[in-house]
Image (cartoon, rainbow, N blue to C red):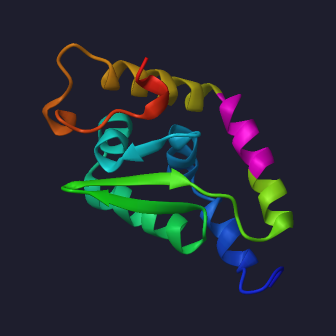
Amino acid sequence: MAGKGFDTQLFFAALADRTRLRLINLMGSDELCVCFFVAVLKTNQPKISRHLAYLRNAGLVEPRRDGKWMHYKVVEPSDPHAARVFSEVRAWLAADAEMTRDRKRLIKVCCAPQPPVLIQGAPKPASLMT
């Protein structure tokens, strides 16, 4: 254990899955509704929720409920060493081709004139509210 109560193994295990990395990248500095993850990654909600629970248990995201909508945002790990590693991982993801495609797909889905039924009425991410 690196810091008080910080689980280093869980931290690295959370980062060892491509879907979880894609979720972290999609959130960026935004808070995102689970429905956007489902629409962008084209996978089912239970699978997305399992991955988000893993990230939450690792201390990398935190949830917020808003009526029927469940939102997640990235949070900095409590351990300073893990926080530095996490910052580097996020910068690396931002430069990855697949991750860039995911972000473009998020913008397309989010800002479509006729959004998919799944996300109709969902609050848009703050960075896309221009």
Q: Is residue 82 above or below residue 5?
A: above
Question: Residue 11 occupies which quadrant of the picture?
Answer: bottom right
| Image location of residue 98, percent across then percent down | 57, 30
| Image location of residue 61, percent across then percent down | 54, 60
Taking 123 as reference, is 6 left or right?
right
Q: Specify the principal SS of the magenta part.
A: helix
130 or 19: which is nearer to us? 130
| Image location of residue 82, percent across then percent down | 79, 64
Residue at the image position 58 percent from the left and 49 percent from the top? 21
Residue at the image position 28 percent from the left and 44 percent from the top? 35
Question: Residue 126 occupies which quadrant of the picture?
Answer: top left
| Image location of residue 73, percent across then percent down | 50, 52
Report the span colored magenta.
Answer: 87-96
Q: Quadrant of the N terminus?
A: bottom right
Residue 54 part of the magenta-drawn span: no
94 or 5: which is nearer to us? 5
Pick out the residue farthest to the left: 117
Taking 29 as reference, is 111 left or right?
left
Numbered marks: total: 0
Residue at the image position 75 percent from the left and 37 percent from the top? 92
Taking 128 as reference, is 118 left or right?
left
Pick out the residue farthest to the top: 113
Residue 91 part of the magenta-drawn span: yes
Q: Quadrant of the C terminus?
A: top left
